[in-house]
Each structure stands twice: as C-alpha cells, then as structure tokens.
Amino acid sequence: MATRLRKTRRLRGGRNMGWGQVGQHRASGHKGGLGITGLMKHHYSTMLKEYPDHYGHSSTHPPHPNITKKWASIRDLDDLFSKFGKEEGGKKILDLAAAGYDKLLGGGKPSGAYTVKVHQFTAKAEEKIKSVGGEVLAENG
C-alpha cells in the first residue's frame, strides 16, 4: 500500500515520535548504558555476536629490541679511569666501548689528557678533550 508520508514525517509534532510517554527513548537508560557499557555484564551476548575480538590480544608481537644506551659524561672520566683505564707510555687510555658505554657526552671539564675509545661522542665532548691534549677515537661495532 502506498503511503503519502513516511513514518518520521507523519509523527512530526507528536512529541514522542512513537516512543510512548516522555523520556522513554531519551537517555542511555533506555538501552542499558551509554556506548559500549556492559559488554562483560548485561550486553555479553551482544559482545559475543557483534564484537567477538573486542577482548584479548590480536596476535603475537616480536620482542622490542633493547634500545637503551649507556652513556658517560666528561665529568665521570676520572672515576671510569680508576675502574677501567690503563696507562701506556705516559698516556691515559680509557676504552669506554669495552666497558659497555655507548656514548660520551660533553658535560663537565676534563681533569687531564685522556685517549678515549667509544662508539659515539658529541662534538662538544671531542672539543673539550682535545683542548687539554687528549683525543677521542671512534670504535666501530
């Protein structure tokens, strides 16, 4: 049967649009909570049917690499030399790469001329060590 107006147009001005008395279709109390509330409670069957993958892990993930770097500052060189350093021919040689350090930072002032072997170093660290007669050697690996 053909109708002149759709239901929405027909119910305009009728205050409740076919939802009974005032407030029955107004707030989230009508549908058991706001949004996806109650998926593990009173909407559990809906969750199983509509959102079966909502809970749990999606897949296995590869482990993250250890990206934390160990660094030392110029102010730490005296302490590090007493632990890991050696003296050859009057030169203070400090192999930070072998000691497990990855980078030399430029904080502090060097107390003496060191020959430092390290994987990475900042420009300021190199400048400060060279200014007192030392050298910084880049270790690969």
Image (cartoon, rainbow, N blue to C red):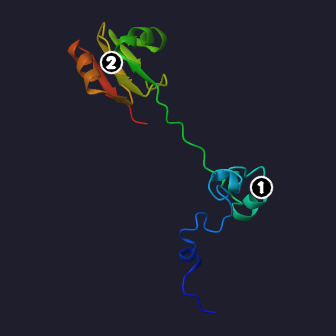
Determine the residue positioned at 48% across, 22% down: 99
Residue 89 showing in the rendered view: no
Rendered-image quadrant of the C terminus: top left
Q: Of the residues shown, which amino acid type is indicated by label 2?
A: Thr
Mark 2 nearby-residue class (10 Å; few <14, some 14–19, many ≥20): many
Residue projecting furthest to the left: 131
Quick check: 8 above or below 105? below
Q: Vertical placement of 41 versus 131: above or below?
A: below
- Lower sequence index among marks 1 and 2: 1
The residue lying toward the viewer, choosing from 93 and 69, is: 69
Q: Is residue 1 left or right of residue 38?
A: left
Q: Residues within 10 Å of mark 1 (few under 14, many from 20)?
A: some
Q: Using the image as rendered, state which of residue 93 and residue 126 is in the foreground.
A: 126
Location of residue 80 (image quadrant): top left
Q: Which mark is residue 44?
A: 1
Image quarter (top left, top right, bottom left or bottom right) of the N terminus: bottom right
